[in-house]
Amino acid sequence: MSNAKVRAVPEGMHTITPHLVIHGAAAAIEFYKKAFGAVEVSRMPWGGKIGHAELKIGDSHLFLADDYPEMGACAPAATGSSPVTIHLYVEDCDKVFNQAVAAGAKAQMPPTDMFWGDRYSKLQDPFGHSWSIATHREDMSPEEMQKRMAAAMPGH
């Protein structure tokens, strides 16, 4: 079979796609549906767990799988913190933030108007992954952003 017409980046995908390792991937899929309006694209069971699943949130894809510590795939502790944040742009930051909290996310920063022109919030999902949720409200030049940052954080 010739691969001459196969695209290096599959149709509809972006060049970077988050791939989360989760303890309880099936529950996480249901949470992401409620919290972010995710649509399940596929799910592949493997050894009594989810070996791979694909969700779509807005125009972006999210891969996830259950943790397999014996294979080096470890999920963050649900009560700990993650060094990675998944950033989600939405039409209504406040609505999606409140929807996610109602679905079980832990609020870390309520929606706030930020100096860089976004309404921005942060939360942690019940599986230990960090999310920022934003609505872009204003375009500005790098100079204007720098001026606003200096005013918002004097002495930094």
Image (tube, rainbow, N blue to C red):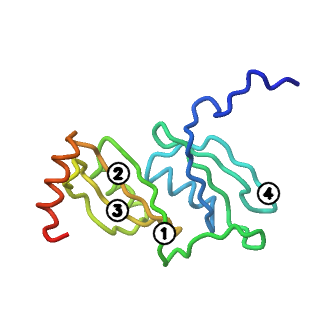
Asked where in the image residue 50 lies, by quadrant, the reply is bottom right
Tell me the amino acid under the disc marked 1: Pro
Quadrant holding the C terminus: bottom left
Which of the marked residues, 3 or 2, is nearer the chain's N terminus? Answer: 2
Tell me the amino acid under the disc marked 2: Val
Q: Residue at x 63, y 60 (%)?
A: 25
For the residue labelled by badge 2, is the local secondary structure a helix, a strand or a loop?
helix
Marks 2 and 4, how far apart at CA = 32 Å
Left or right position of 147 against 65 = left
Q: Nearer the viewer, residue 38 or 73?
A: 73
Dot 4 crowding, Cα within 10 Å, few <14, some 14–19, many 20+:
few
Write down the residue under mark 3: 122
Q: Residue 21: x percent and y percent?
A: 62, 62
Q: Residue at x 28, y 55 (%)?
A: 120
Which of the marked residues, 1 or 4, is nearer the chain's N terminus? Answer: 4
Marks 1 and 4, how far apart at CA = 27 Å
For the residue labelled by badge 3, is the local secondary structure a helix, a strand or a loop?
strand
Write down the residue under mark 1: 83
Q: Which mark is residue 46?
A: 4
Asked if residue 112 is positioned above or below residue 135 in the image, the reply reads: below
Q: Residue at x 63, y 66 (%)?
A: 24
Asked where in the image residue 115 lies, by quadrant, the reply is bottom left
Which of the marked residues, 1 or 3, is nearer the chain's N terminus? Answer: 1
Q: Residue 151: x percent and y percent?
A: 11, 61
Marks 1 and 3, how far apart at CA = 13 Å
Quadrant holding the N terminus: top right
Tell me the amino acid under the disc marked 4: Trp
Q: Residue furthest right?
A: 1
Asked where in the image residue 153 lies, by quadrant, the reply is bottom left
Q: Residue 113: x percent and y percent?
A: 19, 54
Tell me the amino acid under the disc marked 3: Lys
Q: Which mark is residue 96?
A: 2
